[in-house]
Image (cartoon, rainbow, N blue to C red):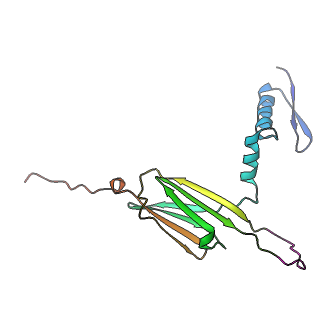
Amino acid sequence: MTNCQVSNRSEGRSVSSRYPLVWDFDQVMNHFFGEGNPASRVLRECSASDTLAPAWEVVETDSEFKVILDLPGFAPEDVSIELKKDLLTVTGHRHETKTEEKNHVHVRERKFGKFQRVLAFREPVENDNVSASLDNGVLTIQVPKAKDAQPKKIDIRTKA
């Protein structure tokens, strides 16, 4: 086998490899995550620490789905909920707080901007009876399952 050079660009070191496949894999990863690929920009933006993506939880019962999102500091008018067929879309916008010119911000870890979370239900849901509440920074959306998707108890008869 031939030796080839694999370069770790972030640290400026190089590693020798006997396996050309390692070099090929490195090239593929550099191509995919490198600056030239438009998809890599989206991946970097989504994984950036300043991206606003609220945590959520989806709980299923026999009769409904309950979607719970952490939205501290959001007002109801900053959040929009849409259910189209079996696709739930939650969008929101947290506005940046304004500071006076004489004040100096030393640390800013709070995230501001827009977000969108989309959930595709695996079972049919009722679009008419959806309810939502925002209480203490927690948004709870209750989406009832369609009547034909809810479990039905079947009684067993005996011959007597």
At horizontal 88% and vertical 40% (from top left) the residue drawn is 9
Q: Residue lying farthest top?
A: 1
Residue 47, x across and y down, in percent:
73, 52
Does the stretch in magenta take in 72?
Answer: no
| Image: magenta residue range | 99-108
58 sits to left or right of 124:
right
At horizontal 73% and vertical 47% (from top left) the residue drawn is 42
What predominant SS class does the magenta segment belong to?
A: loop
Q: Quadrant of residue 115?
A: bottom right
Residue 113, x across and y down, in percent:
72, 63
Q: Is residue 19 visible?
A: no
At horizontal 64% and vertical 64% (from top left) the residue drawn is 92
Q: Nearer the viewer, residue 96 or 150?
A: 96
Residue 85, x across and y down, in percent:
46, 52
At horizontal 75% and vertical 68% (from top left) the residue drawn is 110
101 sits to left or right of 48:
right
Count of numbered tags: 0
Residue 20, x across and y down, in percent:
80, 25
Q: Is residue 140 visible?
A: yes
Q: Nearer the viewer, residue 159 or 52?
A: 52
Q: Nearer the viewer, residue 149 or 88?
A: 88
Residue 65, placed above or below residue 72: above
Q: Quadrant of residue 78?
A: bottom right
